[in-house]
Image (tube, grey):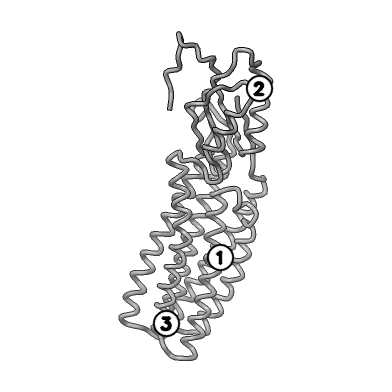
């Protein structure tokens, strides 16, 4: 038995397009300004924002593929592309952090003058653009790892831009040009901290780990407590996508149990209580002459 539930509103296609357009325009403006001002913090932030644009493109592609109907080859559909997108987004961020850190260390050894006025103006624009884009994904981040990745990118960028403004202000007041690469390093640490949880969660789902928020012990207890169920074995829970979860289990039941009403009720309750979208329950009578050969 099973079911399919679309947790993502169709408006997210337009939201992705808007977010990509806003951030791509800002990346171009920030890169030009960074080159003119000689600011590593601006150039680093522009490079990171470009990785975010690529990340948004990946997330949008996965979102679109995940909405395709199952077929003869992909019988569950292409929902798992959303998990891949979250993983690639995390790896993109880590690569950007590495490049940022290397360049910042070189600049710390040889600090160069920075046009603080330009830096602060462009970073101020970045705060507005990134905050606006993050708000587009604010609601979806709670239920979708793919959208959480998009939100995390944008929210982190807004904080990064705040850091750039602070660096520009401090350099203007003190003349300490080394503050620009120092802030860049701090930005890298901040991004790495936020990226780690995204990478960890994506790896967990792609390796068929139990999705966060679900406990196998609670599911087993629930199934064993059902009238007519004597034993539960071969219980597995995994993610079909960043929004859909699946469960399979073998249930040893009483011979008097009526299958259809029982399975229909289990479908509803597993969905409502545990957010299980696809459940497959194999009913057995525990006949010793025909034992189940699969027991985990």
How many numbered dots are placed on residues in this image? 3
Are there few (<14), some (14-19), or many (20+) residues within 10 Å of tag 2?
A: few
Q: Position of residue 273 (x, y in %)?
A: 65, 38
Mark in the foreground, 3 or 1: 3
76 sits to left or right of 132: left
Q: Locate the C terminus by quadrant.
A: top left
| SS state under label 3 | helix
Along the line of sight, the residue nearer the viewer: 69 or 36? 69
Q: Position of residue 94 (x, y in %)?
A: 40, 59
Are there few (<14), some (14-19), or many (20+) residues within 10 Å of tag 3?
A: many
- Above/below status of 14 relative to 78: below
Ranked by sequence position, the earlier of labels 3 and 1 is 1
- Above/below status of 212 relative to 27: above
Is the Cβ of the residue at disc 3 closer than 8 Å to that at disc 1? no
Q: Locate the N terminus by quadrant.
A: top right
Q: At x 42% / y 82%, what residue is drawn?
A: 179
Mark 1 lies on residue: 25
Are there few (<14), some (14-19), or many (20+) residues within 10 Å of tag 1?
A: few
Mark 2 lies on residue: 262
The image quarter containing residue 97 is bottom left
| SS state under label 2 | helix
Q: How far separated are the C-alphas under marks 3 and 1?
A: 27 Å
Q: At x 50% / y 40%, what residue is drawn?
A: 80
Q: How far separated are the C-alphas under marks 2 and 1?
A: 56 Å
Q: Position of residue 186 (x, y in %)?
A: 43, 73
Mark 3 lies on residue: 179
Q: At x 67% / y 24%, what residue is drawn?
A: 264
Mark in the foreground, 2 or 1: 2
| SS state under label 1 | helix
């Amino acid at each position: 038995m099973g079911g399919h539930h679309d947790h993502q509103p169709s408006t997210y296609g337009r939201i992705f397009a808007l977010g990509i357009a806003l951030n791509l325009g800002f990346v171009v403006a920030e890169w030009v300004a960074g080159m003119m001002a000689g600011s590593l913090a601006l150039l680093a932030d522009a490079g990171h924002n470009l990785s975010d644009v690529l990340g948004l493109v990946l997330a949008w592609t996965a979102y679109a593929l995940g909405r395709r109907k199952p077929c003869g080859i992909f019988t569950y559909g292409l929902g798992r592309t959303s998990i891949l997108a979250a993983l690639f987004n995390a790896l993109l961020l880590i690569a950007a952090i590495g490049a940022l850190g290397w360049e910042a260390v070189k600049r710390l050894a040889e600090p160069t003058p920075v046009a603080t006025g330009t830096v602060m103006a462009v970073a101020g624009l970045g705060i507005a653009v990134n905050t606006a884009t993050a708000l587009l994904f604010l609601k979806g981040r709670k239920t979708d790892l793919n959208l959480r990745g998009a939100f995390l990118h944008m929210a982190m960028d807004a904080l990064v831009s705040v850091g750039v403004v602070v660096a520009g202000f401090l350099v203007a007041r003190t003349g300490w040009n080394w503050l620009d690469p120092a802030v860049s390093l701090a930005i890298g640490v901040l991004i790495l901290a936020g990226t780690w949880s995204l990478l960890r969660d994506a790896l967990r789902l792609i390796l068929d780990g139990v999705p966060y928020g679900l406990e196998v012990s609670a599911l087993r207890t629930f199934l064993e407590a059902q009238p007519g169920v004597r034993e539960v074995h071969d219980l597995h829970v995994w993610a079909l996508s960043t929004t859909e979860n699946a469960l399979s289990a073998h249930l040893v039941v009483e011979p008097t149990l009526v299958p259809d009403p029982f399975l229909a009720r289990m479908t509803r309750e597993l969905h409502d209580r545990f957010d299980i979208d696809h459940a497959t329950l194999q009913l057995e009578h525990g006949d010793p002459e025909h034992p189940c050969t699969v027991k985990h």
